[in-house]
Every structure is written in structure tokens, then in C-alpha cells.
Amino acid sequence: MAAPVGSVDAEELLIGWLAARFPDAVVRDETDNNLLNELPTIQVEQLPGGSDDGFRVTRALVDVNVYAATRSEAVAIAQEVRGRLATALAGSTTGTAVVGRVAVESLPAKRPYENTGLRRVGATYSIYLHPVS
């Protein structure tokens, strides 16, 4: 029997996938009080929303935020994340999921953050995926 729709945790999948491709960054779902000492950090957070086809395919809406010491570093990493998601993740298969498509819903852009010791650049993606059969 095939795994049910929605059985793939998109956040967990992206954290593992990005961590393998960005070994010099901390990749996580939440930030903490030690963020300034763990730069660069890539934060992956599934947002409310998204959808599914009721049968197999889920569209997960995911925010990816990059925290870095400078704006230029945060922008560069965010752009590299965007490129890798669109070209390498789309059409790939992991141990738990098939990723059919990645759509950029909001391009990487500066986002406000209270700590002036770091910079935040984020983007929003739709990840279309389904469980491996």
C-alpha cells in the first residue's frame, strides 16, 4: 500500500537535503539565543497553507531564511539555495520522497531582524512532493 498523502515531512526533508549541500552552515528549523555564534545559519520552516490533491501530491509552502554576518553573504547563500532547490531538488528522489517541482513564491530578499549583529535574507517556496512508492 502506498504511503498516504501528506506523510512526507517537507521541513525535515529540506533540512537534511540542505545540510548535506551546505556543510559550512548550520541548517535548522528554529533559531535560538546562540544564533550570532552559529553563522551562517539556514532556517527551514514550513508555513501554514499549502495544499494536496487528496490522493498523493502535497504542495508544502516553506520559508527558507539565511542568517549571516553581512548582507552580501546572506544574499549569496540565499541565491545559492534558490538555485539548488530549483535545479537539483526538483525532479529528485530521496529515501522518503519524490520531489516533482519547486516553485519560488517569493524571491530571496532582505527581511527584518532585531539583532543588528547579523543579516537575514529569506525566500518562500512551494515544494511539490509525494512519498516514495
Image: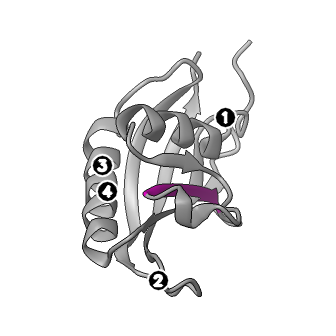
Image x and y of residue 37, in percent: 54, 60
Residue located 46% across and 76% down the image: 118
Residue located 66% across and 34% down the image: 8
Question: Element at badge 4?
Answer: helix
Q: Residues within 10 Å of mark 3 (few under 14, many from 20)?
A: some
Image x and y of residue 70, in percent: 33, 74
Q: Which residues are magenta?
A: 40-46
Residue located 54% across and 18% down the image: 95
Verify CB contact (< 8 Å) between mark 4 and mark 3.
yes
Question: Element at badge 1?
Answer: loop
Q: Residues within 10 Å of mark 1 (few under 14, many from 20)?
A: many
Q: Pointer 2: what residue?
A: 111
Q: Pointer 4: what residue?
A: 82
Counting residues from the N terminus, which is met first, the one under dot 1 or under dot 2? 1
Of the 4 image quadrants, the one containing the C terminus is top right
Query: Which mark is in front, 2 or 4?
Result: 2
Q: Pointer 3: what residue?
A: 86
Q: Pointer 1: what residue?
A: 8
Residue furthest front as drawn: 37
Q: CA distance from mark 3 to mark 2?
A: 21 Å
